[in-house]
Image (cartoon, rainbow, N blue to C red):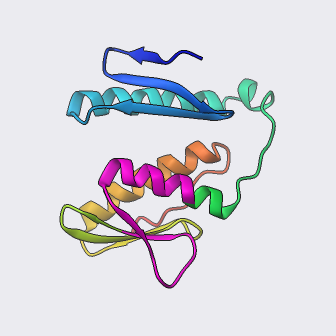
Amino acid sequence: ALPIRVMDAVTVKKAAPGVVELEWASHPVNDLVADSVLSVIMQSLISPNTSKNMAKAETSLQDKADIVRVMLEERYGAVQPADDDDGAFNLTVDETHVTVHVGKETVTCSDPDIQKRVENAVRRMLTCLHPTGGCSCDTR
């Protein structure tokens, strides 16, 4: 399938069966367009008309962790697996250490603003993976 270009800012393409990839250059306007495209995709996935036509597929924790890791790397840079736990990652955002645990759907960070930013990103990622299940990321 050919990629779709949205407002000359975001490229949407089918990466694999059931997987859509968004690409854009980081810029406040492009970020808003990408968020809007992502919102439309997510809304179509949770629509009763769409959902009843989609096959229910379970994603393993490892698959979820791999997908979230790649998306975090694209958004924030280098991501390292946490030593002590499967499905947990360490990354640095604006020179602040952040730990994301995909299995527990938690984000921990010493800076509440950065924590909220990463939680929102992880919530969107997990919602894309399971649009009807939602994400219970902590919002401490």
- For the point 39% across and 16% down, the residue is 6
Q: Position of residue 68 (x, y in %)?
A: 50, 55
Residue 96 figure quarter: bottom left
Residue 97 figure quarter: bottom left
Q: Position of residue 133 (x, y in %)?
A: 67, 50
Q: Position of residue 48 (x, y in %)?
A: 73, 29
Q: Say which of 41 and 81 sits in front.
A: 81
Q: Position of residue 130 (x, y in %)?
A: 65, 47
Relative to residue 117, is residue 15 drawn left or right? Answer: right
Q: The C terminus lies in which quarter of the figure?
A: bottom left
Q: Is residue 69 magenta?
A: yes
- For the point 47% across and 58% down, the residue is 69
Relative to residue 43, is residue 10 drawn left or right? Answer: left
How many marks do you count on the picture? 0
Residue 112 vs 22, above or below: the answer is below
- For the point 49% across and 62% down, the residue is 137
Residue range corresponding to the magenta coloring: 66-90
Relative to residue 105, is residue 27 drawn left or right? Answer: left
Q: The N terminus lies in which quarter of the figure?
A: top right
- For the point 46% across and 52% down, the residue is 70
